[in-house]
Amino acid sequence: MLEETCMEGAKNLEEMRPLTAVELRRLVKALHRILRDSEGNSSLIERFDELTKILYCKVMQERLSVHVAGAFTLSANESDKIVAARVHAVLAQLIKKRPDLFPQRFSQFHLSDTTIRRLVEALAPVKIFSPHEDLKGLAYEEVIKNTFEKGDNQQFFTPRTIVEFMVQMLDWSAPRTVCDPACGTGGFLLFVDRFLKQRKRRPVKLLGFEIDERLAWVAGINLAMHDVSDFDIRCLDGSGFLRPDIRCFSAKIDAIITNPPFGSDLSDKEALAAFELGKDRSSRRRGILFIERCLEKLDPGGVLAIIIDEGVLNSPSSTDTRRLILSHSHPFAIVSLPETAFMPYASVKASILFLQKKKRRKTPAVPERGTFFAQAEVVGRKANGDPLFRVNKATSRMELDSDLPNILQQWRSGSCDGEKVFWSRVPDIEDAAFATEGYRLDLAYHHPSRPEALKALQSSPYPLRTLLDLCDVRTEAVVPSKSLQDEELTYLGLANLSAYTGVCSPVIVSGSSLKSSVKRFVCGDILFAKMRPELRKVCLVPEEIDEGFASAECLVLVPKTDKETGEPMMSPELLSILLRSDLVYGQIVHLVIGIGRPRLNKTVVLNVRLPCPPLEQQRRLLELYRRSERAAQALMLESQQFADRARQISMNARKQLVNDLLHPNNHV
């Protein structure tokens, strides 16, 4: 009887369609609720272990139904004990087939018979396994996302969009062994295998190291569930991949792709002594030491893709790290990620560093364009970890809102947009000026506007003046809620300053509502936003505003006048335009400080240099600019009229559709 039930279950399984991504996520949440409600005394991590085992049994039952069919079918009046015994037997069979995947403490279920039956009831009617690569791992990923928080075990997980991007950026024509020395749940290794299979490339050996025994177990299970054949996952306790004895590990590694725990320090004296960047120190950031160890273990000519704290690229304390990088490798690409990339697990400004290890006799061929730099503003992820979508204007379909596909396309084609994606030559390590500036490798330092601005200033036919020569700084500050609480004030916060355009939109507020210090301004002053200077929020206060107050994040500049003529040294209108230009941005882009709230300090802004032509020439330049602006405004108005017309046509089409539906005899 049981045999018949099992065979019927296997037959029905073949006829089922795999669950969609949304359905998979709902299923996993339901399974977790069952465990939480039925095993009330269990911890979050213990429930994760049981979910891992039950999902592994389910997926393998679907893939190998001839051998282990029946575990997830139910017959009428079956007791909880019988159902549970069948599931226990399946796990035992699977462990017998792959004993290397199951350390002793993960080798059996720790659930009541009733709980197992409830899990089987939820899983019996559905099919998880799918031949479609984009659906295979969704259930497993949902388990991970909803189980671990950074506070539980100091782990967080790399978003799928970033994993896929890093794999796709590498050249896969040569590697034989690919390693992730901080493999976590095996996400990087899994996608490497999937990527190579999709492109029918020859298989590679996948090697993973992990400091946490549970995650090492999870990584092996994850790869086995997805039919990865050649992999080796090793749990290294203590300092993990940074242990001194790992240097004896002699496997030839052609590619390393990883997201190491760069936010914590290593303080083990014996381990530190083995590193050029760690010896004679009491502690060092793990991410820095991972770079050195990865370059050490790579074969000459091998490639490394590693996520690092952006401070590694620009902070003075990491100068020795950058010198080591440039001594042993060529940075062929550097991609800056948004601060929200790893939320909600961590808030950190990170970059992806792509390196090729130098060969013994010959350094790698440096591309003619130099190093590829890119800034990703979005990676398809909200701050809470949920997917972030946008509408594709070309197809009118929803897609992940991510800059990474466009960056990948520009990397492959060799193109660039010049602002957020560009190629730049990193100076030689022996370059004295580069050494003096700490071998900086961050995108801001190598931004093309820097050399362009310097070249433009050097070729200026007019005398150069600093902003401090041309302006005074108004420093009148008040806290309105204390001194002006009964007044209605004109206020300009950062949100009221338009990016790039010089347009401001003041609001009238009660003085009592402004609890922080603000700065007074008057008509003819120039407001310069020090925060996020890449947005070029600079405006000339218009004539309609006699007086007002601005955010403390603004510099209030008062254009100076010539003492003899009484004329401004530089037209305030021209000055405000220049302060939004690449000429100024190129002088300050590498001097922005801070990660969460990047800003410029006052001295940096006032030291900006500007060509100062005669007033007559200034007037002529302004007239040419205004003429172009009028043409641009006319085009914008025309485009708005076309957009309005398009919306009207669309609305009329909907009305006509309903009319044709209700009155078919009127339709010709």
Image (tube, grey):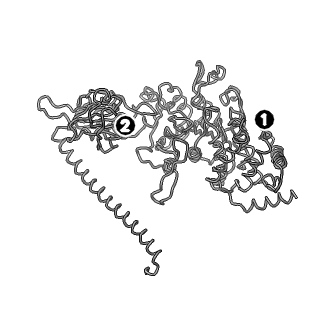
Identified by mark 2, the residue type is Pro
Residue 107 at least partly seen: yes
Q: Is residue 207 above or below residue 195?
A: above
Front residue (pair 129, 586): 129
Quadrant where the C terminus sits is bottom left
Label ID, residue 105 = 1
Front residue (pair 191, 492): 492
Label 1 sits on a secondary structure element that is helix
Q: Quadrant of residue 297?
A: top right
Q: Earlier in the sequence, mark 1 or mark 2?
A: 1
At 18% across and 33% down in the image, what residue appears?
569
Residue 296 at least partly seen: no
Q: Quadrant of residue 221?
A: top right
At 25% across and 33% down in the image, what residue appears?
521
Q: Is residue 223 above or below residue 150?
A: below
Identified by mark 1, the residue type is Arg
x, y (%) of residue 376? 48, 43
At 75% across and 59% down in the image, what residue appears?
13
x, y (%) of residue 206? 69, 42
Residue placed furthest toward the left: 565
The reply to whether dot 1 and dot 2 touch (C-beta < 8 Å) is no
Residue position marked by numbered label 2 in the rendering: 533
Quadrant where the N terminus sits is bottom right
